[in-house]
Amino acid sequence: MNNLRLTFALIGFCFLAVFLPSSRGSAEDSFAEKLRQSEGTTVKWFMWGGSPTINNWVDGFVAPRVKQRYNITLQRVPADAAVFVNKLLTEKQVGKATGSMDLLWINGENFKNARENDLLYGPVAGQLPNFTLVDPATVTFDFGYPVEEYEIPYGRAQFVFEYDSAATTPPRSFAELAEWVQANPGRFTYPKPPDFTGSAFIRQAFYALTGGHEQYMNGLDETLYQEKAPKLWAYLNSLKPYLWQQGRTYPKDIGALDTLFERGEVLLNMSYHQASAQSRIIQGRYRHTVRTFVMDKGSIFNTHFTAIPFNAPNKAGAMVVANFLLSPEAQLHKNNPENWGDFTVLDLSRLDEKERTAFATLNLGEATLELAELAAAAVPEIPSGYLEWLERDWERFVLRGR
Amino acid sequence: MMRHPRVLLSLLPLLIPFAAIFLGGIIITVLQSLGILMFSYHYDDIFFGYRELLADRWFVESALFSLYVAATATTIAIIFGTLFAYLIWRLPHRYHGRTVIYKVPLILPHIAVGFMAVILLAKTGVLAALSYQLGLIDSFTQFPDLLYRASGIDIIGAYVYKETPFVMVLVYAMLSRFESRLMDCAKMLGASPTRIFFTLILPFLMPAINTSFIILFIFSFGGFDLPFVLGDSYPGMISIRIYDYFFHKDLALRPVAMAMLTLIFLMSLGFIIAYLKIAGKMMPAARKL
């Protein structure tokens, strides 16, 4: 028995010595315990499954690594965040103390819904050694909702537009977009909010048309919203006659718009993922001439996270996997557009020289904008209360206002 | 029923899942529509969901649109299905086996029919490409908008394609029990083929037609998959509105989604009762479903 313990302790110590050079003392001790507990277990990770690239990254990179290093079997379960938050709610309601999900990929409204109903285990991020590589100031809020270490940062995405450089010259501002749309009737549209990307598109237009994002960062202000929002509705309604299908209907989600763009039915596309055009060129779905651009008045970025349900059967295993996802190795691999292209959440100044260079020399591909250009345009997400108002009123004033 | 406890007992294996799953689901739906059992949210007004719903003209528009799509699609499918079944039945018997091909849409899932429609009819779909190759249009932008129409023709068309064979199966089964000597008799007495169809055949078929009308109408009224793939953003079928409320909006609005589900259920129930009443009045013999 003593021998067994000693062996586990030694294994744990080796892991810490090798993989976690910059971790904190107290976190280290309890994390070694987590490593020991999670040996030989299975972690069920519920995540959005709509992207083959991301699925391949999880199945082909993350799963084999955590198996090899921590002897954890990672099972990816594809599900929409809204669906598993609903499932979790039902489990909470019927008092199911041991659920079926260990790790969730989550952010924004779904996180808010989950926190308001006390569905998450935490605070958890601070218990992970690799969290010390993140600048906590960059992950204090998720869509304006305090994170309080109930989520573990996972990746960063920024909104970009996509176009085929062989087919058109893109607009550079929302004013130019209006002219462009009139000159190319029927060749532009956006996914119907509350689709995630469509909703981000109207938020971005909202910032650009009403004088920037700063004014919305101090909590909800209904008077301000009522004063500013009509400008957005007037703008979107002025586009309507020139949209795809004369704006009578909108693609129901970003997947539907992607299809229209791939077939050439529309000339501009958008993505809440700065490197997705490059990944699609690599996959052969997009022509080699497809490029991305951001508008002058800024492009929204957000951080996405992992979280652990209150009733996760394998919390220790989930923490080990979440910690691995946050490691420089996984973050670097994920940042490569050949693998996925999702940007890192790590603070590069906290990494060692070798890791920093690896990130700096990453080839993001021709279709992805330079980091500096993206960073210069980056603006934060709006608090989710505004988001709900915008989605509700878009239906009222744009979709039905004909 | 009470006088036959053994009947009740032998029905238990069926009744328990019915009570637990079906009734249980309905009870929770109704409760949540009243703001009860709503996690950590509290509502001062138990009719919050219903008030929100009825104040919203969109709900009424969606309900009317669903009604229109379901009624149109079902009526067309019934007419086509009955006619085709009758024509097949009139064929010499040795050809009946070959007509099995009409059953193909029966085995296709609704969602597959939806995707077929998109692949064929989209502006950059197969038909548009064909018209372009044949020189009928110069660019895909000239191809007519067949999908995502506010008139719902895409959904109606897909439902008709899917439902016609269903009607044919039911009607054909009924026809094969028809006493064909009655037809010979009518012919000898000088009745025209139209007269035979409307006074002899159709009344005989009414029970099958009524059954298929109710099944198909209720199904397409609340159906989700075809409107999800095809269909306009506005007003859109009612099932899509429920989906949006359930998955895409703030959880505090859950009672609204549940109120819609409750109303859909009540409406369907109402349709069945109304239809049976009308059908029963029109021909007493067809009352039995």
Image (cartoon, coloured by chain):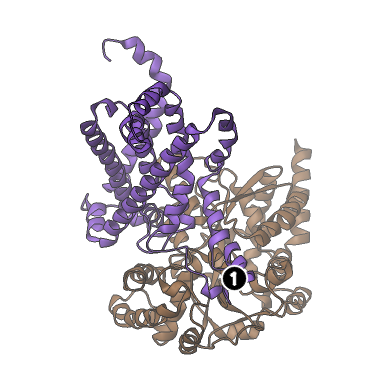
Q: Which chain corresponds to the colour brown?
A: A
Identify the residue shown where x is 37% and y is 69%.
Answer: A385
Give the x, y percent position of residue B90.
Answer: 48, 33
Rendering quarter of residue B116: bottom right
| Image hue for chain B | purple
Q: Which residue is mark 1?
A: A156
Give the x, y percent position of residue A232.
Answer: 37, 80
Answer above or below: position of A41 versus B289. below
Left or right: A65 as drawn, with respect to A82: right
Question: Does the image show residue B36?
Answer: no
Identify the residue shown where x is 54% and y is 70%.
Answer: A139
Give the x, y percent position of residue A276.
Answer: 64, 71
Name the foreground residue: A397 vs B249.
A397
Answer above or below: position of B190 versus B158. above
Name the foreground residue: A308 vs A33.
A308
Give the x, y percent position of residue A141.
Answer: 48, 70
Rendering quarter of residue A241: bottom left
> From the image, which quarter does the C terminus of chain B lie in?
top left
Left or right: A8 as drawn, with respect to A129: right
Rendering quarter of residue A207: bottom left
Identify the residue shown where x is 74% and y is 48%.
Answer: A9
Q: Chain of mark 1?
A: A
